[in-house]
């Protein structure tokens, strides 16, 4: 019985790493969408560059915060 529990503990550590890898896909896609659409917006309205860039940085910060939370959560439990 103890061998089964020891094997299960080893698997949970690996699964948390796999879970974080899968969770990092979302912020990666989000950052790509933010900067891709920001580039299109700058090409269409160059006079609004300051506002567009500020919104890009804010969106990037929120996406990266999600990635960092995903990195920390496997170590919390």
Image: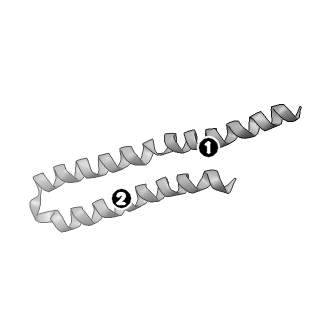
Total numbered labels: 2
Q: Secondary structure at mark 2?
A: helix
Point out which mark residue 75 bears. none
Specify the color scheme. one colour
Check residue 16 in the rendering and tell me which mark sits there, or answer none: 1
**Which of disc 2 and disc 1 is earlier in sequence?**
1
Point out the frontmost of discs 1 and 2: 1
Q: From the viewer's perspective, is residue 74 above or below residue 51?
A: above
Residue 36: x %, y % from top left: 24, 47
Quarter of the image for the N terminus: give it: top right
How many other residues sit within 10 Å of disc 2, few (<14), some (14-19) or many (≥20)? some
Return the residue nearer the eye: 27 or 12. Answer: 12
- Residue under numbered circle 2: 59
Which residue is rendered at x = 46% and y = 45% of the image? 24
Question: What residue do we see at 18% from left, 52% from top?
Answer: 39
The residue at 42%/57% (across/down) is 64
In 3D space, how far apart are the residues under numbered discs 1 and 2 (Cα atoms)?
26 Å
Neighbourhood count class around disc 1 (C-alpha, 10 Å): few under 14, some 14–19, many 20 upward: some
Residue extending farthest to the right is 1
Label 1: which secondary element: helix
Image location of residue 26, percent across then percent down: 44, 44
Q: Using residue 42 as the reference point, say whether residue 12 is left or right of it.
A: right
Q: Residue at x 50, y 57 (%)?
A: 68
Q: Position of residue 35 (x, y in %)?
A: 26, 52
* Viewer-closest of 63 and 5: 5
């Amino acid at each position: 019985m103890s061998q089964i529990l020891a094997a299960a503990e080893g698997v949970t550590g690996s699964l948390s790493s796999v879970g974080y890898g899968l969770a990092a896909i979302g912020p990666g896609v989000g950052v790509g969408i933010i900067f891709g659409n920001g580039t299109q917006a700058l090409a269409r309205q160059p006079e609004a560059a300051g506002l567009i860039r500020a919104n890009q940085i804010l969106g990037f910060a929120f996406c990266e915060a999600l990635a960092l939370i995903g990195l920390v959560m496997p170590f919390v439990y």
